[in-house]
Image (cartoon, coloured by chain):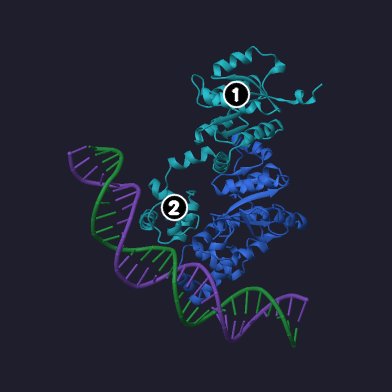
Chain colours: A cyan, B blue, C purple, D green
DNA sequence: CCAAGAATACCCCATTCGGGTGATTTACTG
DNA sequence: CAGTAAATCACCCGAATGGGGTATTCTTGG
């Protein structure tokens, strides 16, 4: 008996880019801890493999591309978790937009890795996920933390009701003012000239009827602007 | 010239457990990419070092324990981000409860690592964060993803009993600052010399660890002081 | 298509602020 | 009683602020 064999993690790949898929498959096969099964180039073809499989030979972790011909990786993930909630899915993609990240999390992905992730890290992530954790690429993690800090609903409410007719640019500047930053710091953060920042602030003061940062901060906070 | 020297990342450690702190410091010092500065056993002692530092010798990344004697690591992180928003903080702890994770994220931590994280991963995380990402231990990441899926109702910050040890006089002055008044106006209202008002405000800043009216107003309002 | 608002950038100038230093008086605490 | 903390007042200096203009894009809605 090879005890190692029984412990190998069954991994699947759903990825439409031929070269990338083959390369990834090869790389993963080098790892004796993994067993690569059900490699598909679309969600549909993956499901056909899945449907023909026995319960005890299901993949444990799936590396899922998001942009696929036909059904998207997010939709596919939703379906998979619907049928087999114990199967873990890692989104494996080049996309970093909030929308796709958020959707992926909501449909039940346990990982979100960028395609430039080193293969060692990918394997490591697979193991971590099997151990009950989750894996997120650093740049994605940053966005996820932002989502926790500023839940999606909150943003929508704010953009609707602008308290003082502040323009988007002014609102942005005001937020920085509330953070206690100086004009120079704000300018650097927003990639604008300090004079522009100043102009915006002057206009903000007029609209809010104040004439100092302290007063602006107070008003902004009292109205939940920032 | 050693070009590597100029690129070293300045890392600080705030950790009360003597042995652990020393061990961690030693380990990190082995990495030539890092420069360990400001090692403290409490938030208070860390702040005293920080307050005495020049702008260009501030730590870039701080490894922050959560459970500390006196001010907690979460509270300390809040203060630090208040003063130096560009400084990154990694919570480095044994706790895995949702409450502390959530609070840490909300006060602005860019990383949350468990203390059993391999030193290589810690160093790696520091680099990732400097590169604009975030780092989260797998088991924590799982909880964070759950938070995104099931947003927690954002409750108002816990109102501390004694906000900042402000003296009665200082508290009174602070209220006027929050009103958006200038030193001169405050002086007239309180029948004091403008110099005195100024002195009080300077002391307030020191106690609150801020350095501008806007920041003081924000902190005061967030803590319901005024 | 054009007027109007938004966003951008810049100048001048007086005032205010933030930070450092130092001194005196009062008041409480050990 | 000695030491300490709070409160008060004072000055210097450089940086930041606020308030007044001016001016050039760039959208955008009518």
Q: Residue furthest right?
A: A1
Which is more N-terminal, label 2 or label 1?
Answer: 1
Residue A49: image x %, image y %?
61, 14
Horizontal side of B30 relative to B88 (left or right) equals: right
Give the image quarter of residue C1. top left
Q: Residue at x 61, y 39 (%)?
A: B152
Q: B80 above or below A42? A: below
Residue A143: image x %, image y %?
54, 41
Q: C27 above or below A54? A: below
Horizontal side of B97 relative to B184 (left or right) equals: right
Does residue A172 show up? yes
Closer to viewer: mark 1 or mark 2: 1
Helix, strand or loop under label 1: strand
Q: Which residue is mark 1?
A: A13
Horizontal side of A207 relative to A176 (left or right) equals: left
Local crowd size for mark 2, using a 10 Å CA cut-off: few (<14), some (14–19), many (≥20):
many
Local crowd size for mark 1, using a 10 Å CA cut-off: few (<14), some (14–19), many (≥20):
many
Q: Chain of mark 2?
A: A
Q: Are marks 1 and 2 in contact (CB under 8 Å)?
A: no
Q: Are marks 1 and 2 on the same chain?
A: yes
Q: Residue at x 58, y 33 (%)?
A: A112
Q: Which residue is mark 2?
A: A174
Helix, strand or loop under label 2: helix
Q: Chain of mark 1?
A: A
Residue B147: image x %, image y %?
62, 37
Q: Residue at x 40, y 46 (%)?
A: A168
- Quarter of the image that includes the C terminus of chain B: bottom right
Q: Label 1 to label 2, Cα distance in Å?
A: 46 Å
Give the image quarter of residue D21. bottom left
Q: Which residue occupies the foreground of this view, A193 or A22?
A: A22
Give the image quarter of residue A184. bottom left
Badge number at residue B203: none
């Amino acid at each position: 008996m090879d005890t190692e064999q029984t412990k190998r993690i069954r991994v699947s790949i759903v990825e439409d880019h031929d070269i990338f898929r083959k390369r990834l498959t090869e790389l993963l096969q080098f790892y004796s801890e993994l067993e690569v099964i059900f490699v598909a180039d679309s969600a549909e073809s993956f499901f056909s493999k899945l449907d023909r499989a026995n319960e005890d030979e299901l993949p444990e972790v799936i590396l899922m591309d998001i942009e696929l011909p036909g059904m998207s990786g997010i939709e596919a993930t939703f379906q998979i978790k619907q049928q087999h909630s114990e199967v873990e899915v890692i989104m494996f993609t080049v996309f970093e937009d909030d929308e796709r990240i958020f959707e992926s999390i909501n449909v039940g992905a346990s990982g979100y890795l960028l395609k430039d992730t080193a293969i060692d890290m990918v394997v490591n992530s697979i193991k971590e996920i099997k151990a009950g954790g989750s894996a997120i690429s650093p740049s994605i993690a940053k966005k996820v933390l932002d989502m926790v800090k500023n839940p999606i609903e909150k943003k929508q409410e704010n953009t609707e009701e602008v308290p003082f007719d502040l323009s988007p640019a002014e609102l942005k500047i005001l937020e920085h003012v509330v953070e206690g930053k100086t004009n120079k710091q704000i300018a650097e953060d927003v990639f604008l000239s300090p004079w522009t920042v100043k102009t915006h602030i002057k206009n903000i003061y007029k609209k809010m009827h104040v004439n100092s940062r302290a007063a602006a901060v107070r008003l902004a906070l009292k109205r939940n602007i920032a």
